[in-house]
Image (spheres, helix red, strand yellow):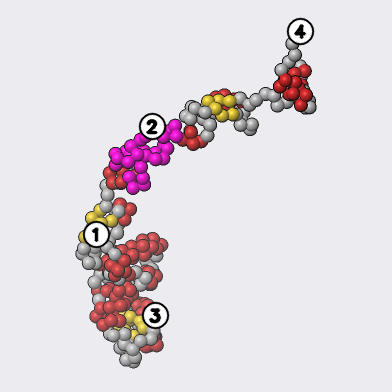
Amino acid sequence: MLAYPPLAQLVEQSAYTGSVPRSSRGGRTKNMKHPPEKLCLYCKTFFQKPQNESEKNWETRHKFCSKKCFDDTRRMEIKICAYCKTNPVKRIGKIYCSKDCFSKANTGEKNNKWKGGQIKKICLICSKDFLVDQYRAGSKTCSLNCHKLYFKTEEFRMNQSEIIRSNINKDLQYLSNIVSKFKNLLRRCSKYSMWRERIFKRDNFICQICKVRGGKLCADHIEPFILLIYRNKIESYEDAIKCNELWDINNGRTLCLPCHYKTPTFGSKVQKKLLESNSNNGNKLNNKI
């Protein structure tokens, strides 16, 4: 007897109408080769190679199915905060659990840029103790209000005049024998401006000739300024500061500008008197005026 195939096989052969794949006929198809697969080292599941990844990267570096698995493997070793020793470190590659622990662990002497801490100083205005950082070691006042009051002290104004003093000493190298120009240089220093203010306050800003208060006022020397320089033989800024007669308030008076013009000692009138007195005595000034 002949052996016939099963009925189900005959039904499948009769119902199949598609084309037979070329592989069954000995040929190759384009999509027959499946992408390579790997086993994830963390979740133990297979994953396929991405299409845009190189073969070298796939074989040597790609070991996890996703970035989550890669991060979880790094979090498997739980680190404890290096400062508080209690909380775990959540971020990868860090040693502190929070910004507070980081700031506390790097303050004071533990910081690499530590220079000794704050300096204790005494305010020159209110005489109170205050602390300042290293970069403010030259500060002299404790607050902004004291700082504004310090600007009005004589000590500050005398320190500011050191710059003018250096300029005066430089100019004196070229003008050592010219007293008139040296007189103009001295009138720009802080000592001279403080002398003028004391005279104005003493006279209550009233002209001593016309008795008018306010306006454009001048501090006039009763004995001329240039005569005092010539008589005391002042040749430097230090000599002028040490000369008490030069800064005597009793030798000054408050005058308005029109009254100052009328005085016999205004401007070059004093120089003419010096020349006349010198010529009468038979002495020469040697171009000092």
Mark 1: secondary structure: strand
Note whether residue 172 is visible: no
Under mark 4, the amino acid is: Met
Q: 2 or 32: nearer the eye?
A: 2
Q: Tell me the CA gap for discs 2 and 3.
A: 92 Å
Q: Tell me the CA gap for discs 3 and 4.
A: 155 Å
Sequence-first tag of 2 and 4: 4
Determine the residue located farthest toward the front in the rendered image.
Answer: 1
Q: Mark 1 — residue? A: 130
Q: Mark 2 — residue? A: 77
Sequence-first tag of 3 and 1: 1
- Badge 1: residue crowd in 10 Å (few <14, some 14–19, many ≥20): some
Under mark 1, the amino acid is: Phe
Q: Tell me the CA gap for discs 3 and 1.
A: 51 Å
Q: Mark 3 — residue? A: 267
Residue 54, how many percent across, how many down? 62, 28
Badge nearest the viewer, 2 or 1: 2
- Badge 4: residue crowd in 10 Å (few <14, some 14–19, many ≥20): few
What residue is at 30 percent from the left and 46 percent from the top?
Answer: 104
Magenta-tinted stretch: 72-101
Q: Mark 4 — residue? A: 1
Magenta: predominant secondary structure element? loop
For residue 121, which quarter of the picture? bottom left
